[in-house]
Image: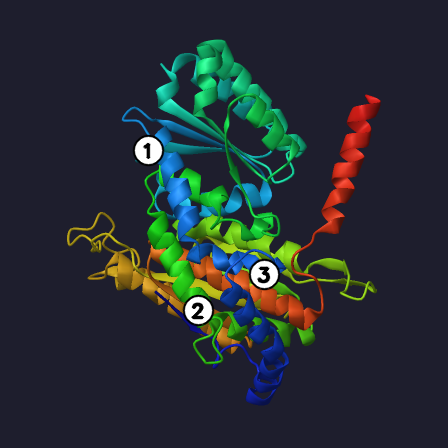
Amino acid sequence: MLQFGHAETARVSKQKHLALTEQLEQYRLALEEVAHHNDYADDEGSINLPADAGLREHVLQCADALATPDLKYIFVIGIGGSNLGTKAVYDALGGSFDTIAPHRPQLIFLDTIAPQQLTLLKELVASRIRGPEEFVCVIISKSGSTAESIFNAELLLTSVRERFGKAGNARVVAITDDGSALAQHADGLNIRTLFIPEKVGGRFSVLSAVGLLPLALAGVSIEELHKGALDMRNACLADSDENAARAGAVALFANYLEGVAVHDMFLFDPRLHSLGLWYRQLLGESVGKEKNREGKVVHTGILPTVSIGSTDLHSVGQLYLGGPKSLFTTFVEVLDAGVPDLSMPHERFFPHLVPMLDGTSADAVSGAIVEGTKIAYHKAELPFAEVALDAVSPYTLGAFMQMHMMQVMYVAVLMFVNAFDQPNVEAYKTETKRILESGA
């Protein structure tokens, strides 16, 4: 599955680790109770998604109804938690190489409003889609009132209607809250609708229909995704050293108490870049708060950043190693790339350049860079944790994502903030609405 390490590198004393672990015991027991109820009545109900066989069956039935031999494009319209998790899994499993080895069917993500992308999209619908059976459009918005998503949906669906008339409606799915404005309009247009449990927020929703339907349509095993998440969930409910979510939360918070307020996820595999972006939202929205649980203004948070190895060793490595000691890092590596190792050619073009590469392989060079980076961080007295995935698969990705979703729940308890709200996000939405309504 995956391995998590921190004891020798996080720079947290055993005494501090035990004290913070004890602070989390009541919450761990509460999570056990949530899992025992196996429903979505609590804010933490998302931990029950991977155990929901009925959800999987319903999503697979919908995917089967939409899948065709000619399916080419799956348009995913959503922003933030409505698309980041899906994109993380898709890109990790090969979507990041679409320009070299295009997936069929291919997921195309529409999040923010980008005129250039929308223009190309309209051209794609007009010239490269021959019939409704070649596409599916998935519109995701819990409230049904997300301006970016509705704007993008209107433009795409107008293009579809111009080509195929009402026949295109059968190729559209809305994923939203039960009773939302989007659900009501979708029902009036005979558009399929899947629902998100009310208390499952966007950043915790990848294991719901939000992520499951697009991924199932793209050929990803959502059964394995859920299995990895469920196995990890159970491990992260236990009062043991195998509880990686709790251990990671303790390491992160202990360093936060020492003024280390930046968490960098350093991913040594470019396929995982979008996974880092997913985690950035997860941590940022969950612990970055103006007020604590008692309503006291605290302006607290941990800044999440994303780095890719070894690229960013040559861009921000100097800052990380030589700059302020305000950085906690989680190094993420993949033990099995899933393809044969590539050896340095015996007949080299540049035999006298970097002679130490003679007789090496891609795995050996990559491994040396990862280990060299960890040693450099250790010598610089920079705290870090390590996550090693056995391979990149639906199972390991489900486990990774579940571990980190539970990690931020534990961190939020230690920081005494609500992990499940994001009231300040409404500030830009309110001003945007005011501007649009005034015509300014």
Secondary structure of the residue carrying numbered label 3? helix
Q: Residue at x 41, y 34 (%)?
A: 107
Q: Which residue is mark 1?
A: 102
Q: Is residue 167 above or below residue 182?
A: above
Kind of residue sitting beneath label 1? Pro
Q: Is residue 73 left or right of residue 250?
A: left
Q: Position of residue 268 (x, y in %)?
A: 41, 58
Residue type (three-letter) at the residue carrying disc 2 = Asn
User: Helix, strand, or loop for circle 1?
Assistant: loop
Q: Which residue is mark 3?
A: 44
Q: Earlier in the sequence, mark 1 or mark 3?
A: 3
SS of the residue under disc 2: helix
Q: Position of residue 65 (x, y in %)?
A: 36, 30
Q: In the image, residue 125 lies at what x, y percent?
A: 44, 17
Q: Position of residue 431 (x, y in %)?
A: 80, 36
The residue to which callout 2 is attached is 234
The one nearer the camera, 267 or 58, is 58
- Residue that lies at the very extreme toward the left in this rendered image: 346
Circles 1 and 3: CB atoms closer than 8 Å: no
The answer to whether 220 appears left or right of 33 in the picture is left
Type of amino acid under label 3: Glu
Single out the mark in the foreground, 1 or 3.
3
Residue shown at 45% from the left, 53% from the top: 311
Q: CA distance from mark 2 to mark 3?
A: 14 Å
